[in-house]
Amino acid sequence: MAIEKRVVFRSAWLPWLLIAPQAIVIGVFFFWPAAQAILQSVQQQDAFGTSTEWVGLANFERIFSDASYLASFKTTAVFSVLVAVGGIAIALVLAIFADRVIRGALAYKTLLIWPYAVAPAVAGVLWLFMFAPSIGVVAYALRQAGIPWNHLLNSNNAMTLIVMAAIWKQISYNFLFFLAGLNSIPKSLIEAAAIDGARPWRRFWTIVFPLLSPTTFFLLVINIVYAFFETFGIIDASTEGGPGKDTAILVYKVYYDGFKALDLGGSAAQSVVLMAIVVTLTVIQFRFVEKKVNY
């Protein structure tokens, strides 16, 4: 019979005191800005915020009648799927190789972790310089190989650039969690399967990957949130949403309409829609995808 251990506080206010710092941080940096965005989404302000007019749902009606805003939904969907799936898959492969006993494994792991220390805007600039049509070394190599590259004119090239930069930036984070998950799997299970004649591919799909499902599910949630929000710096530094608006995902359009087009009400309405989409996707993942996770 398992004995459940519970922490009992002698004072009724001590638990609230312990969670107060985190609650304050969440309130100041999430709930307060979210409440402001909801309020501004039903208002119309001038560029300097000196006059405010209550417009109800007019901002939402206007953005959903905007063809460029509707097109950004498709751009965001393609971008987020490529970044989340690609980043998780590549990091898993790298973690499997790093989990093996090889010479220089520590240096290999350290090099894979370094990109996580790079700021998103810096990552965007690095990839921009490598793929710049005029001076980029990678762009030059592609031209020498007969592959035309110009992300300033070709929307597919531009999307490829920001996807690669975003995956490169996030691989280190995914790699760390997968490596920790692989280290926690008992080697005896894999050795027993090998003795029974299971080949490496079968051992991976029947033993390793199911035991990594909690880690994979966690990273799926984190990577989708990352693709929706934290890739803004990469896009702004590398393509600025171009060519045209072909790489303007939802979070970039919120910034562009609010700070460049000075449409504060429309930008706030877009931020509310974006927040609702991310919350809905997270709930769906926990409601349906988590059922397939083996804890």
Image (spheres, grey):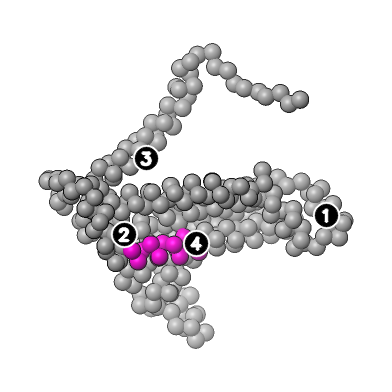
The kind of secondary structure element at disc 4 is: helix
Which quadrant would the N terminus be assigned to in this image? Answer: top right
Which quadrant of the view contains residue 101? bottom right
Give how far across and how far down residue 33 sits, in percent: 31, 41
Q: Please give the label number shown on residue 212.
A: none
Left or right: where does residue 103 sit relative to residue 282? right
Q: Earlier in the sequence, mark 1 or mark 2?
A: 1
From this view, report whether residue 35 is shown above or below residue 199. above
Q: Which residue is mark 4?
A: 81
Question: Alpha carbon of mark 1 to alpha carbon of mark 4: how far?
Answer: 34 Å
What residue do we see at 46% from left, 60% from top? Answer: 80
Asked whether the beta carbons under mark 4 and mark 2 sit within 8 Å of each other, the answer is no
Question: Alpha carbon of mark 1 to alpha carbon of mark 2: how far?
Answer: 51 Å
Observer-nearest residue: 284 or 193?
A: 284
Observer-nearest residue: 13 or 96?
A: 13
The kind of secondary structure element at disc 2 is: helix
What residue do we see at 84% from left, 52% from top? Answer: 192
**Main secondary structure type of the part rendered in magenta:** helix
* Bounds of the magenta segment: 70-83
Asked whether the beta carbons under mark 2 and mark 3 sit within 8 Å of each other, the answer is no
Q: Please give the label number shown on residue 253.
A: 2
Asked whether the beta carbons under mark 3 and mark 1 sit within 8 Å of each other, the answer is no
**Amino acid type, mark 1:** Ala
